[in-house]
Amino acid sequence: MARATSRSAFAQPAGGGSKPGYFAIGSANALHGLDVAIGNMRDGMRPVEAAVAGVQLTEDNPDDHSVGLGGLPNEDGIVELDASVMDGPSHKCGAVGALRDICHASAVALRVMDLTDHVLLVGEGARRFAVEQGFPVENLLTDAARNEWQKWKAELSPNDNRLAPPTEPRGGGAPPEFTWGTITLMAMNEAGDLGGTTSTSGRSYKIPGRVGDSPVIGAGLYLDNEVGGCGSTGRGEANLINCSCFAVVELMRQGRTPEEAAREVLARIAKKCEPRLRNARGEPDYQLKLYAMRKDGLVGGAIMRDKGDVAVHDGTHSRLIPLPAIYT
Ligand code: GLY
C-alpha cells in the first residue's frame, strides 16, 4: 500500500480557518460555479440556493458527461439524474432520484425541500413534481453521450454479469470519459450558515432505476450548521454503505480537520472494501473523493486513489488544490 506521505496541501487553510467570511468548496468541475455561489450569497441568497445556482452551470454543460444535459445514460440509453440539497440553518433536505427529462435536478431537489413535507422523490413521481413546478422537459441524451453509450453496448457480451463495473474497455477502444462523475458544491456565508448540493447522472450504463449516493443524505452530502459539511464524488455504492459524508462531519465535530476526517473515512472504506473491487495490491480499485468544510472556514478533503483536485473559494478568488491520496 502506498500511503501519501507528502505534507498536506491544506497546511495553509484555503479558507482562513476561524476567519468569518464567504467560503465555498466543491469538486473540480464546480470551480466556476464557486464564483457564482459566492456572488449570489453576497447578493443575499441563501447558501443552499447559491450552491444550486453554482452547479447549474455544469448541469447545463453538454460537455460534462457526469451531470445534467449530456450526462452518460443508463443501460437503456436514458439519462437518469440524482441530486440532493441541504440547508444548514433549518437542517432541511430535499432530493430526487432517477429523474428523467429534467436538466436542473438540484433545483428540483431544492423545491422538494422548500415546498413539500418530503425529503426524497424518485422516478416518475419526481418527474411529475418537476413538471408541475414548471421545469422544462427535454431530452438530456446528447449525440456525444449516445455515441459513448453505443460503444459500451457494442462491447457487451451475453456472458457479462452485472457485478463487474465497466472500468476497462472490453474489446478495445477508449474507455468512457466518465463512469462515476458528479458535481458537489458547498457554500457558507458571513453569518456562518451553510448550504450544499450534490448532483449527478450517476454511474454510467447503470441498471435503470439505480440510485446512487448523491440524493441520499449522509452518503453523498451532509452538513450540520454547527460543525461543517461534506460532499462526495466517485463510486456511490461505497458511500451508501459507509454513510461517508455523515461520518466526515461527525469526525469534524470531534475536532478533526476536514482533511483528517476525510482521510479517516476513506481508510475505513478501504478496510471494508469487498475483494472483487480490489486491485492486485489489495487496494480499492475505484475512485472516491470527499470534500469537506468546517464551520471556521477550514477546507480540505482526500481522494482514494491517484490524483484529483478540490475547488475552493476563500471569498476573494477560486482555485484548485490537489487532494491528498490514500493510495498512489
Ligand atoms: N457518486 C455518483 C454515483 O455513484 O451515482
Image (cartoon, grey):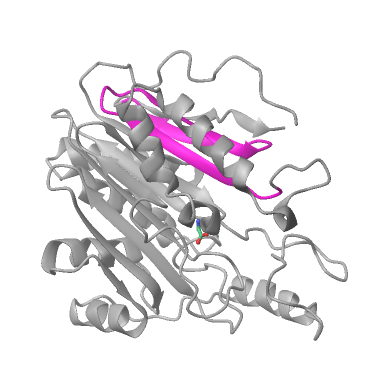
Work out which quarter of the rendered image holds the N terminus and state it: top right
Is 115 left, or right, of 236 in this rendering?
Answer: left
> Looking at the picture, how far across and down is residue 244, in whole percent?
44, 45
Q: Check residue 309 for magenta coloring.
A: yes
Please name whichever residue, 268 or 128, is drawn nearer the observer in this view of the structure. Answer: 268
Residue 165 image point, x, y percent = 69, 65
Q: Is residue 35 above or below residue 132?
A: above
Residue 206, percent from left and from top: 58, 73
Q: Is residue 318 above or below residue 20?
A: below
Residue shown at 40%/22% (left/top)? 257
> What residue is rendered at 18% in x and 62% in y?
113
Q: Quadrant of the C terminus?
A: top right
Task: Report which quarter residue 177 is drawn in.
Answer: bottom right
20 or 59, which lies in front? 20
Of 72 and 260, nearer the camera is: 260
> Where residue 83 appears, x then y in whole percent?
36, 62
